[in-house]
Amino acid sequence: MSFETRSLAELTGHDAFIRRHNGPDTDDVTVMLATLGESTIDSLINKTLPASIRLQGELSLEGPRGEHETLAYLKRLAGQNRVFKSYIGMGYYNTLMPPVIVRNVLENPGWYTAYTPYQPEIAQGRLEGLLNFQQVVMDLTGMALANASLLDEATAAAEAMALCKRANRKAKSMAFFVADDVFPQTLDVLRTRADYLGFELIVDAPERLEAYDVFGALLQHPGRQGEVRDYTALIDTAHGRNIMVAIAADIMSLVVLKSPGEMGADIVLGSAQRFGVPMGFGGPHAAYFAVTDELKRMMPGRVIGVSKDSRGNPALRMAMQTREQHIRREKATSNICTAQALLANLAGFYAVYHGAEGLRSIATRIHRLTTILAEGLGRQGATRVNTHFFDTLTLAGLDLDTVRGRALTEQINLRYGNDGTISISLDETTTAADVATLFDVLLGVEHGQTVAELDRLVVAEARQGIPATLERKSEFLIHPTFRRYRSETEMLRYLKRLENKDLSLTHAMIPLGSCTMKLNATSEMIPVTWPEFANIHPFAPDEQVAGYRQMIEELSHFLIEITGYDAISMQPNSGAQGEYAGLVAIRRYQHAADEGHRDICLIPSSAHGTNPASAAMAQMRVVVVECDTKGNIDITDLRDKAEQHREQLSAIMLTYPSTHGVFEENIREACEIVHANGGQVYIDGANMNAQVGLCRPGDYGGDVSHLNLHKTFCIPHGGGGPGMGPIGVKAHLAPYLPNHCVTPQAGLEATSSAVSSAAFGSASILPISWAYIKMMGARGLREATQLAILNANYIAKRLEGHYSVLYKGANGTVAHECILDIRPIKATSGISEEDIAKRLMDYGFHAPTMSFPVAGTLMVEPTESESRYELDRFCDAMIAIREEIRHIEHGEWTPDNNPLVLAPHTQADICSEEWTRPYTREQAAFPSDAVKASKLWPAVNRVDNVYGDRNLICSCPSIDAYRD
Ligand SMILES: *Cc1c(COP(=O)(O)O)cnc(C)c1O
């Protein structure tokens, strides 16, 4: 061995992660640049990015740091959190995720790296998981239809309010009733929404509903103080007065309580968190949302439904997709896009694992221990505020300071009300020993009661907190799925069987344009399940969350440096929520400046559908700005419209680089025009992966942006969520960022109501983005952006002559993605972008984004994480498919019998006795060497969307359906 001349620092490899994250190595880069005819990567970037917006020098960030070093540092930070036992409740409970689910789903990239199931033939596994979740929700709520998750309980309540108004054509009132025992964080979010929907909120005791003329009402079940009520009569009276009723229900309580559906509720919603998902300082968790049959076609969010494939076999897919916001734009009734698919799957699997009997044992145990606690406290003369209960007791007359002192000594958090009450919520993790400790804390040590004695008494006297009329009589989870997988072996195989049907990043690149499917590194994911992050209640006292605070503060600083803004809010749980929060901040700012009348929002025609949908939710009027033939914003049209509306102009929403995949040269000018006419500039940050380290929206004219941390900053997509959509703002907007009524933040207006249930949104996934930035450092982040642009240009170049790239920048390059125009191919062959998408499955790939932002196109975004090897594999497949299309153009294959329109090919096709196709079975299923070596079989043939939408079935099909 010759003497090693590298220094110790170099050998330590602080920057080693950069090479792990970025796909192409130095040799790849050389070859790719040569293909493009570029001498250096800088020359490519200089051609692509307008000089006028280039960041001078490097971002000021620490790092890069090695993976182990980063995890060690983060572990120390996490150690500053103090994990006390929480009895706070209010929508967040301790829970036990079955280890077989932790390891095989939550910690498994086969599940967490998938995308929203837009391509159902290679997504049947997670579609089945989500259908299970819907079935659980329908059974427990007693409703006709459930969706596949919303972001959190509070936003679900806001969706319910909006749905009541839309559906209730008979009510003229603009007022909405909220029971005074609804969780305060839910009321906080309702206030924000109501402000901009023009609704008045009336908060009063539930039984006072009769006194008001309202279009709808929200009730909490059980109430904030734990009260369990039968709402049947109240709902009946409300219906008689044309008032629709939504119930926010605790999912665990529904296991033993009469369902809200049986009480007559129109909408039932809530959090599925306590079905096995850790509290995580606020999230992520799935909210559920269920409606009556009459409301099913007005359902917000995504709904999984049963349809059939081209062989007539049952097949799952997202139902009623044409209602989605990106198609309906400003007519959309909700801006929900990314939801909580992974978390819904986790909650669904929790129910599969336990089945009805297991859930009944858990809920009954919780209730038994609560009854024991209630009994013991009652015997010692404690005053209970709630008469009936499931898991929560609210006590009055105790000395708060004494109890708090004893609780802290025992490392216990109770809920201390402003009115001097103490509430205690028990959960799945509570034991008899815990109840004994609670007696000591609440009563002092001399109470002389034992849990065993009290238990005997409770059983002997058949005592319980639930009135007999409110006991659940109806069956639930009777479908075989909820019986068959009780042994761990069966469960393990079920999870693996589902996983094996789906294409994720563990198989191949997922070149979905605008979605940024990049590496979700294992070291970034590891901290998510650390108990110091997972087991913290969002309303835990500040002193216990120092680790979280510091991590969030550091991440905020990183993001401020990366974006050029002055302040960040971590509250929004998705990009679309960020848009809404950003527009609300603009409206609040303008209102404070006596410019509240400004309500016009300019949006280019190329924008993502969430932009106009969010603007509509913020009660803005959308004015569309046209694009020119090159895909750029038509600056003349922008100037005309900005001037025409200058008195009413509130904002513009721009995406940069545009969804057309180019850096517009005149972005600064566009921002200046809007500012000159009194408007604010919202830059949609979904495309930050083309900018980090090269330019900053805060520098070239943005006032506010959201960042999709699940795109640019490595939070995995989870098959359709979780996500995080923090917003960065300039200083003038900072005071108007969303605050939180339970955990108010310094520096924010006290009157600024919230947009999410928890102050920091889905806090427990923030360490993913934190670790990514820490391990990459300024240089790594810049290189990642450069490589993302190089990769996209390499693809555009290799596909040249086979497909036409729709839009290019001034110097003939694309940004980090490119749009392939399939319309000319359709004209000559009849083959559509969808046929190509399905044929790509036979080649082992997930399709690019279909028909967004331009109908009849495919938008390809490779990201920096894909190596040249993988890019070539994809390009080879695309080129081979183009050759196949030529067979149709040349008349060798007919338009209705060729491997494209009959794609994807399944094992059923290949094994069928009959084969009357003009291509071989091998061409059908093994069209490339790569798939010969490793094949992911599409689980079903092409799915019939129309059939499923006409015959809407969104529950688990009976086993018979699979037999005939
Ligand atoms: C993904 C995306 C959004 C929406 O973000 P979600 O996190 O899915 O809500 C908005 N705009 C653009 C351009 C996007 O690509």
Image (cartoon, helix red, strand yellow):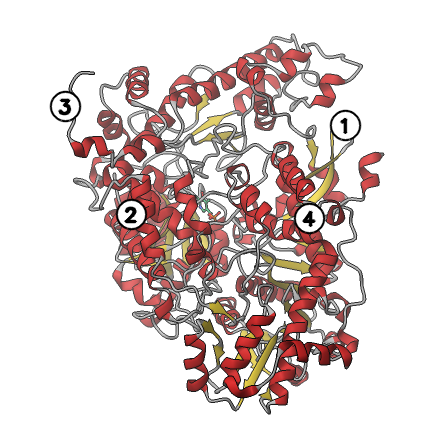
> Do we see residue 525 in this rendering?
yes
Name the residue beneath numbered marker 4.
132
Name the residue beneath numbered marker 2.
697
Q: Dot 4 lies on which element?
A: helix
Question: Residue 916: x, y in percent?
Answer: 76, 12
> What residue lies at 67% left-to-right and 10% top-to-bottom?
919
Instruction: Indicate which label's residue lies in the foreground, 3 or 2.
Output: 3
> What residue lies at 52% left-to-right and 57% top-to-bottom?
278
10 Å neighbourhood of mark 2: few (<14), some, or many (≥20)? many
Q: Amino acid at mark 3?
A: Thr
Name the residue beneath numbered marker 1.
311
Q: Is residue 498 left or right of residue 447?
A: right
Name the residue beneath numbered marker 3.
5
Q: Amino acid at mark 1?
A: Arg
Instruction: Indicate which label's residue lies in the foreground, 4 or 2.
Output: 4
Q: Tell which circle, 2 or 1, labels the residue nearer the N-terminal end.
A: 1
User: Marks 3 and 2, how far apart in space?
Assistant: 42 Å
Pointer 3 and pointer 1: residues touching (CB < 8 Å)?
no
Q: Dot 1 lies on which element?
A: loop
User: Marks 2 and 1, how far apart in space?
Assistant: 50 Å
Q: Quadrant of residue 360?
A: bottom right
Q: Amino acid at mark 4?
A: Asn
Q: Amino acid at mark 2?
A: Pro
Q: Dot 3 lies on which element?
A: loop
Q: Tell which circle, 4 or 2, labels the residue nearer the N-terminal end.
A: 4
